[in-house]
Amino acid sequence: MQKIGFIGASGLMGHGMARNLLAKGHRLALTVHRNRERVADLLAAGATQAATPAELARGADIVFLCVTGSPQVEASTLGELGLLAGAAEGLVIVDCSTSEPESTNRLRERCATQGVRFVDAPLARTPVEAEAGRLNVMVGADDATFAELLPVLKCFAENVIHVGGPGSGHVIKLVNNFIAQAICTATAEAFAVVQRAGCEPRKLVELVSAGLVNSGIFQTMAKTLDGDLAALKFELDYARKDIRYYTHLAESLNVPTVVGEAVHQSLALASALGHGHKFVPSLVEAQEQITGARLVPR
């Protein structure tokens, strides 16, 4: 069993990950954010509390990060109270956040100067799967590090995919999220067009459900027509952040990202209209405001 530190256990994804690590017998220490209630059950189950990331790193074999994005990852890793301030040679830091590859590369190089490995292992699926220990994880690491981490990752993941060398995990994650948000954005727009044209959006759902255009993401967005705006529990502002990271990545590679910019602006508009702290399906509500369509039953 490993001695594991965890930053972000109060989050929607992090809580389930931490709970499953404890349930599999690992020794777990965690930092406590503002919402102590979210980790009360973990502390009651045997997790210990560290005052700072530096304290968390002392004596740990692995530290998991599951936070909002690169600024939070950098703040947790660097500085007088960051992980590196307390890290011993041999520590493995695993970033399960959705982060910018450029930041990930800088942190990996900085960690290496202290003999610390920094691994990108972002997540897919939802908080429901996190609690059930059935997440998907995409890992960017060398073969030896991947083999070392695999048994631990299997504690909270159903599918652990070695997507390539260091840095590959965050690249694949951003492209995955771009495809998902492109479907969400296109679906919300399509529902508005259909309804404004005098047709029934449910008939579009019936047709798509019977053909190759169908997908799990489309079906999740279709639930908005029944009034369910929480079928995809992913905050819209987080999705906006992820697509901004994606367009930054594409720009750094000199790859035009016409669709990516359109998706990003659609999310930015929905956020400006007041839906940023709601879940992604509220793109449909934004389309109602923009177009006058009536889609979500109230």
Image: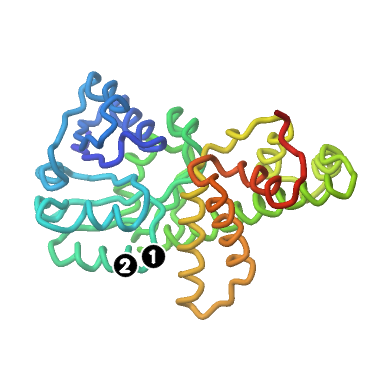
Q: Which residue is rendered at x = 46% and y = 58% of the image?
A: 163
Mark 1 residue type? Pro
Q: Secondary structure at mark 2?
A: helix
Q: Where does the image place residue 67, in percent across and percent down from the top left? A: 34, 46
The residue nearer to you, when weighing 237 against 273, is 273
Residue 279 location, quadrant: top right
Quadrant assignment for the N terminus:
top left
The residue labelled by disc 1 is 101
Mark 1 vs mark 2, CA separation in Å: 6 Å
Q: Residues within 10 Å of mark 1 (few under 14, many from 20)?
A: many
**Color theme of the render:** rainbow
The residue labelled by disc 2 is 105
Give the vertical position of 109 relative to 11 (above or below). Answer: below
Q: Which residue is rendered at x = 14% and y = 58% of the image?
A: 79
Q: Residues within 10 Å of mark 2 (few under 14, many from 20)?
A: some
Q: Where does the image place residue 28, in percent across and percent down from the top left? A: 21, 32
Q: Secondary structure at mark 1?
A: helix
Task: Report whether 233 appears left or right of 205.
Answer: left
Q: Which residue is rendered at x = 49% and y = 33% of the image?
A: 129
Instruction: Using the image, tell me which numbered label, if any, was put on residue 142.
Output: none
Q: Where does the image place residue 189, in percent across and percent down from the top left? A: 73, 52
Give the vertical position of 277 relative to 36 (above or below). Answer: below
Badges 1 and 2: C-beta atoms under 8 Å apart? yes
Task: Report whether 256 appears left or right of 195.
Answer: left
Mark 2 residue type? Asn
